[in-house]
Image (cartoon, rainbow, N blue to C red):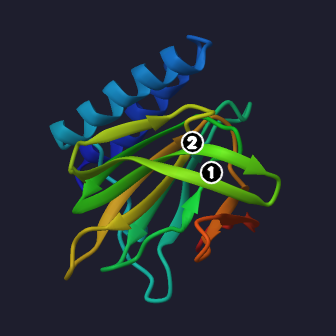
């Protein structure tokens, strides 16, 4: 990997440090979204080789950087063909996500009824996100499904969370139109 591409990760960290100084979720996520997309489209954000390998059994979730003050965490996810998430939340935390390789299908949902462990959702949008595409989730608008849209190769995404996302709620659909909330503990691979 060239020296300039290795420096791209440090440039991302420097920009994230600056962005979180803005304070509010909307300002922070807007700046991160712009900076992250720009670095990806310039081709200057080189990821170490170990972040590029998919896993056969599930998508890979790997820690790239964690701010020492836990203001944000950067996670790289590598998605094999057909791999995706269930409908899930972000545990009340803001997040910016961007595609660095391949293509992802992103489906957003609004929570329309919450009865504790039983919830109803309405799909609000479905987009095909390509390299350089980015989006943000700011609670209470934090419910979505991610899926690799590439039928024969991997996709890679970068996720910047407003803290460390070590758990979330995943929602299992049932025939009656309700989804049932299950806590999911999140771990890093490798």
Above or below 91: residue 78: below
Name the quadrant of the N terminus.
Answer: bottom left
Label drawn at residue 21: none
**Quadrant in the rendering for residue 119:** bottom right
- Closer to the camera, 86 or 2? 86
Residue 181, how many percent across, how many down? 73, 63
User: Residue 102 is drawn in which quadrant?
Assistant: bottom left
Local packing at callout 1 (Cα closer than 10 Å; few below 14, some 14-19, many 20+) is: many
Circle 1/circle 2 CB separation < 8 Å: yes
| Horizontal side, residue 110 vs residue 42: left or right | right
Q: Is residue 76 above or below residue 177?
A: above
Name the element at disc 1.
Answer: loop
Which residue is tagged 1?
Answer: 89
Q: Residues within 10 Å of mark 2 (few under 14, many from 20)?
A: many
* Circle 2 residue: 142
Q: At 60% across and 44% down in the image, what residue appears?
A: 111
Determine which quarter of the picture holds residue 153: bottom left
Q: Is residue 81 above or below residue 100?
A: below
Q: Give the residue at x 57% y 42%.
A: 142
Report the Cα–Cα distance between label 1 and label 2: 5 Å
Front-lying residue, 112 or 36? 112
Residue in the foreground of this view, choosing between 112 and 136: 112
Q: Position of residue 100 (x, y in %)?
A: 28, 52
Instruction: Tell whether 143 sits left or right of 14.
Output: right
Classify the position of the C terminus by image quarter.
bottom right
Q: Residue furthest top?
A: 22
């Amino acid at each position: 990997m060239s020296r300039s591409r290795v420096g791209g990760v440090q440039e991302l960290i420097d920009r994230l440090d600056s962005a979180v100084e803005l304070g509010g979720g909307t300002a922070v996520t807007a700046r991160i979204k712009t900076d992250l997309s720009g670095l990806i489209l310039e081709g200057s954000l080189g990821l170490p080789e170990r972040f590029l390998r998919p896993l056969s059994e599930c998508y890979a979730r790997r820690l790239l950087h964690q701010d020492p003050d836990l203001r944000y965490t950067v996670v790289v996810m590598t998605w094999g063909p057909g791999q995706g998430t269930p409908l899930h939340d972000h545990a009340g935390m803001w997040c910016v996500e961007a595609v660095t390789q391949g293509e992802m299908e992103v489906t957003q949902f609004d929570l329309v009824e919450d009865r504790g462990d039983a919830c109803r959702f309405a799909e609000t949008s479905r987009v095909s996100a390509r390299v350089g595409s980015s989006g943000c989730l700011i609670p209470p608008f934090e419910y979505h499904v991610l899926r690799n849209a590439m039928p024969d190769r991997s996709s890679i995404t970068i996720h910047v969370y407003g803290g460390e996302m070590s758990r979330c709620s995943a929602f299992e659909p049932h025939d009656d139109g309700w989804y049932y909330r299950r806590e999911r503990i999140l771990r890093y691979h490798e």
